[in-house]
């Protein structure tokens, strides 16, 4: 899956791949493979990125162009 939106939003936040990789507890090369779509990003890591960037996983996955996050669910 092509994940260019991960790169776009990371660059919008002036963050490096190394910073994001540390946040996700993966190596920079592994994170780079997520951004390029070589490897699929696990759902729990995608969810962490959506929280970090204050957006939705749907936005990161190109299911919407609305960057604003959804209201949080009361069910955990």
Image (tube, rainbow, N blue to C red):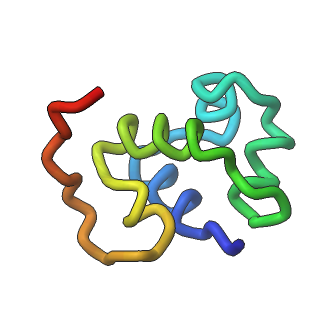
Residue 61 lies, in percent from the top left, at 50, 67
Q: Position of residue 37 (x, y in %)?
A: 76, 66
**Residue at horizontal 69%, vertical 22%?**
25
Q: Quadrant of residue 51?
A: top left
Corner quadrant of residue 59: bottom left
> For this view, does 28 lie left or right of residue 53?
right
In this view, the residue in front, 29 or 37, is 37
Query: Relative to residue 43, is residue 74 drawn left or right?
Result: left
Question: Which quadrant holds the N terminus?
Answer: bottom right
Instruction: Say if 29 sits above or below 23 in the image.
Output: below
Which x, y percent locates residue 72?
Answer: 18, 40
Query: 19 or 34, which is in the foreground?
Result: 34
50 and 43: which is toward the camera: 43
Q: Is residue 57 above or below residue 17?
A: below
Q: Quadrant of the C terminus?
A: top left
In this rendering, would 72 be left or right of 76? left
Residue at image position (50%, 53%) is 11
Vertical order, 30 against 3 (above or below):
above
Going by the image, does 38 lie left or right of 42?
right
Residue 35 place in picture, x, y as percent:
69, 58
């Amino acid at each position: 899956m092509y994940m260019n939106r991960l790169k776009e939003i990371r660059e919008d936040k002036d963050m490096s791949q190394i910073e994001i990789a540390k946040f996700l507890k993966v190596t920079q090369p592994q994170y780079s493979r997520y951004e390029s779509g070589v490897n699929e990003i696990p759902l729990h890591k995608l969810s962490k990125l959506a929280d970090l960037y204050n957006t939705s996983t749907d936005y990161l996955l190109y299911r919407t162009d609305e960057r604003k996050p959804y209201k949080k669910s009361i069910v955990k």
